[in-house]
Amino acid sequence: MQSLNIFNTLTRDKQLFVPIVPGHVRMYVCGMTVYDYCHIGHARVLVVFDMVQRWLRASGYMVTYVRNITDIDDKIIQRAQENGETITQLTDRFIAAMNEDAYALGVERPDHEPRATDYIAPMQAMIGTLISKGLAYQASDGDVNYAVRQFPSYGQLSGKTLDDLRAGERVATKQSKQDPLDFVLWKSSKADEPAASRWPSPWGEGRPGWHIECSAMSTRLLGDHFDLHGGGADLQFPHHENEIAQSCGATDKPFVNIWMHNGFVRVNDEKMSKSLGNFFTIREVLKHYDAEVVRFFILRAHYRSQLNYSEEHLEDARQSLTRLYTALKETPSHTQVDWQEAHAQRFAAAMNDDFNTPQAVAVLFDLVTQVNRDAGVNLAKQLRALGGVLGLLQRDAHTFLQKGSRAATMIDEAEIIRRIQVRANAKQAKDFLLADRVREELLALGIVLEDKAGGMTQWRRS
């Protein structure tokens, strides 16, 4: 295998990846706060880092993959109270829903899925260490806060100085804080909060802050210094910045070698938000689109790019995935990659260039073209095997195509005629590959084309 290069958010450049322990990758990804169903932004995190761990394993590394679950939080407490249920009832229900969504998207389970509430003792131990080092203090309101001005390299991940961050502070802060940027490590319990959200501590009853949860869980399961830390771009600041301050401050060691952040998801070129009415849960999307289509839609974009969710883009992803499956009609389900073959070499080069899945997917389509032209059984097997590295193309092709055809009967006559014209224009320009692709895609959608004398094309539903 070739060398793997990964874009490091911390250094803002691509770096040669060298595990701290040869042959063993330790990787932590910030998971979900489980008070509601996962949305399409969560789907991207799940699929992207599933792809990352799959490629690391395919590259011959042993991987220890940790993705945490935040099961105590202000929103969790509020939602449980609104629903008239216990915190555990709420979180257990949404953890089960999250796992159902992840399974549907072909996401493999991490090696460890720690729940925050199982790591209260390590969190308290880390907080105690930070206080003893002068990096944290208990405020007059009972909260324990991290003193950011006592950590000289605070802001290294966001690329901003403390003064820059202070100038950008817009939210009114508690008078008990020494600095507006100080963040909570231990939240003192309030009178109206349920007993299930309170733990005894040296600083009084309370619960951990969000940031300390990930520092404690990651270092407990992966060690004080590990290889990769991932999450959505929205977590870069303040969550991941605060993790660095906590972890490095407590251990006096480097925390993470490479930070990875996937890009935002937008909906029809707008920020996704409930107020705009463009907020979609994974299970809402899966009512209308096959889960593998959604996974393919996510993976054909580079993980660091902005991903624009729209019905048009999902429909295009469905048609493209249909084209891939059309080339696999007579191919066995389980095949092995021949890494010496030219397409596999190009696929590996793409994946080793910061997990460049768009280029890797382009290799799959090059294979389709060659399979269709040469009817090569071995190349079809290679197509299926390389798709499997991305968690794609592992189903029976006929089953997928039949399902796709049934879903596609909704295609209207105007769209069929538009595609026939695209094909006619391609033939006139002698772009026969595009012309064949349009025919294949329409056939997969249950539309049969018949070319007549005089250049006319008729169509019918199969």
Image (cartoon, rainbow, N blue to C red):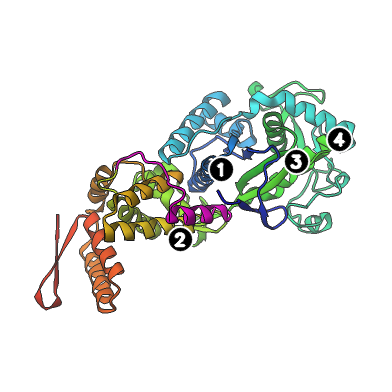
Give the label, 4 or 3, closer to the camera.
3
Query: Badge 3 local density, few (<14 within 10 Å), some, or many (20+)?
Result: many
Q: Residue furthest front?
A: 340
In the rendering, which numbered label is found on residue 255? 3
Judge whether residue 130 can be spotted in this image: yes
- Residue 208 in magenta? no
Mark 2 residue type:
Asn
The reply to whether discs 1 and 3 touch (Cβ–Cβ < 8 Å) is no
Q: Which residue is mark 2?
A: 268
| Residue at mark 1 to residue at mark 4: CA–CA distance | 41 Å
Q: Which structural element holds mark 4?
A: strand
Q: Secondary structure at mark 3?
A: loop
Spatial CA span between label 4 and label 3: 22 Å
Q: Quadrant of residue 74?
A: top right
The mark found on residue 137 in the picture is 4
Query: Going from the N terminus, do you reach mark 4 or mark 2 first?
Result: 4
Q: Which residues are magenta?
A: 332-356
Q: Nearer the viewer, mark 2 or mark 1?
A: 1
